[in-house]
Image (spheres, rainbow, N blue to C red):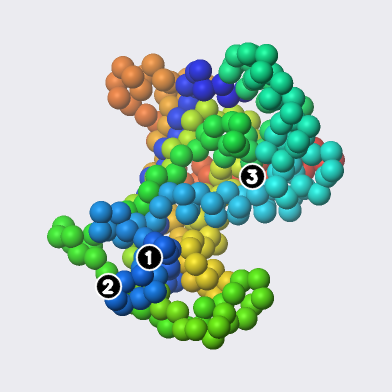
Amino acid sequence: MNTFAKLDNRYIFTGTLMSTEAMHIGSGEGDVRSDSTFVKSNGNFHIPGSSLRGVFRSTVERIVASLGDHTCLLSPNDQEKCITISRDTQEKYKEKVGKGEKDLDLVKWLSEKNRLCKTCNVFGSTHYASKVRIADLPLININSQAIQPEGIIRTGNFIDRDTETASDGALFDFEVIEKGFQFQFEIIAENLEGDDFGILSLGLQELLIGNITIGARASVGLGKCQLNDDVSIQFFDNNDHKFTLKKYLEDDEMGVLPVGWIKGRVKEYLSGVFKMKG
Ligand SMILES: [Zn+2]
């Protein structure tokens, strides 16, 4: 159970994410060159952590649902109890809050009887903090000088997603990052337990394979990216005899895991799911 009152473990994944296709994440604004500029922070290209977070989570949800495991947003079950979508659980939760129950007790209650599905248990819901934080991903400057790519403008019909037709036949220009650019990547996870490791690793594995697309027009192949396999995994975990929180605080020392650790957690999760199903 994750109460956030304790810090049982922390896992930090750092590396570089490369665009393997051109990518466009709209800033919501245009300029003289295009109708939609690539999102920037202080003038520098970056992928907002929230953009990666959204596709990372939905990628994991799709896999978990396909395996027949519990993820509420794609659950076919009317009896769904996860607080993210269950009115019944939300009402009961409100009652408890109204009675002044402590946060610790509320979290304990949520962790029981499927009131949180496996993906909400990792990525959070409106009533439950996420265990995973995805930092913004700044573009890595190729030279020490702040060199930025000139995003190339592509012109095309802007396709209406719902009707799959060009809206007004209008041409739409947008600024892209071309393929081959690298972004600094960091995911920090805390208080992982049980299946959380496998759930998180499913998303990491898809990133390593290069199956995740970020930003606009993914349906035409834009936004594909891949996590380089030199990803560094550092951790402390009070369940580990060597690299504990105490060791981390005393000696600034964290354990280091090989990238194969991710595959190991995926396999562990899968064997649990298929054992459960008999
Ligand atoms: Zn859920």
N-terminal of the pair, mark 2 or mark 1, is: 1
- Identify the residue under disc 1: 29
Q: Nearer the viewer, residue 214 or 276?
A: 214
Q: Quarter of the image holding residue 134?
A: top left
N-terminal of the pair, mark 1 or mark 3, is: 1
In this picture, is 158 found above or below 200?
A: below
Q: Nearer the viewer, residue 128 or 100?
A: 100
**Which amino acid does the dot numbered 1 rest on?**
Glu
> Quick one: SS at disc 3?
helix
Which label was assigned to residue 150? 2
Task: Name the spot of residue 219 as percent of width and height, x first.
Answer: 58, 72
Task: Name the spot of residue 60 as percent of width and height, x first.
Answer: 62, 50
> Quick one: SS at disc 2?
loop
Q: Residue drawn at (77%, 47%), measured in percent from left and top?
A: 75
Alpha-carbon span between mark 3 and mark 2: 42 Å
- Identify the residue under disc 3: 267
**Which amino acid does the dot numbered 2 rest on?**
Glu
Q: Residues within 10 Å of mark 2 (few under 14, many from 20)?
A: few
